Image (spheres, rainbow, N blue to C red):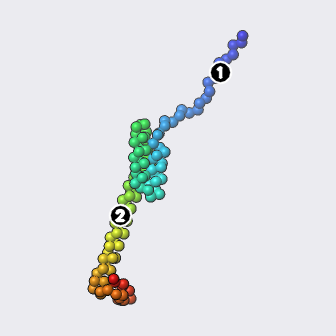
Amino acid sequence: MTDAPPPAPAYSGAPAAPVNPGKTMGIVALVLSIIGLHLIGIIVGFVGLNQSKKAGQKNGFALAGIIVGFVGLVIGIIVIISLVAGGAALFGGLAQVCAELGSGVWEVNGVTYECP
């Protein structure tokens, strides 16, 4: 019987990094927020951030997705309000002109108005 040396332990390399369960959701949240799906990006970002917190990890992607989502949402709301206010002013001005001119087609200072 020969005494064979025990097999050498397999080299496993560097220790594995801790798993961050919310990282993928954080990346998805950031992408959604950037492409304009702000509300969905915010929701997914909060879900990813909570998953990471439960695992004791930080999640910069989720936080960035939440911030970009909120900034985009606020800018979008401002743009919509501006467009609605501009449209109301435009149509309100037309109603005032038609009230003064009466119904028919009118040309005033090179501008044609069609009033019902």
> Can residue 63 be seen at all in this image of the molecule?
no
First-in-chain label (2 vs 1): 1
Mark 1 crowd level (few <14, some 14–19, many ≥20, 10 Å Cα): few
* Secondary element at image label 2: helix
Relative vertical location of residue 4 with respect to residue 71 in this rendering, above or below: above
Tell which residue pokes out farthest to the right in this image: 1
Residue 91 in the image: state x and y as whole percent.
33, 76
Q: Depth-wise, is mark 2 or mark 1 nearer the camera?
A: 2
Q: How many numbered markers are drawn?
A: 2
Q: Amino acid at mark 1?
A: Pro
| Label annotation for residue 7 | 1
For the C terminus, the quadrant is bottom left
Residue 29 in the image: state x and y as whole percent.
45, 50
| Label annotation for residue 78 | 2
Relative vertical location of residue 61 with respect to residue 97 in this rendering, above or below: above
* Secondary element at image label 1: loop
> What residue is rendered at 65% in x and 21% in y?
7
> What residue is rendered at 40% in x and 51% in y?
42
Residue 88 in the image: state x and y as whole percent.
32, 73
Q: Amino acid at mark 2?
A: Ile
| Nearer-the-camera pick, 84 or 102 | 102
> Can residue 55 be seen at all in this image of the molecule?
yes
Tell which residue pokes out farthest to the top in this image: 1
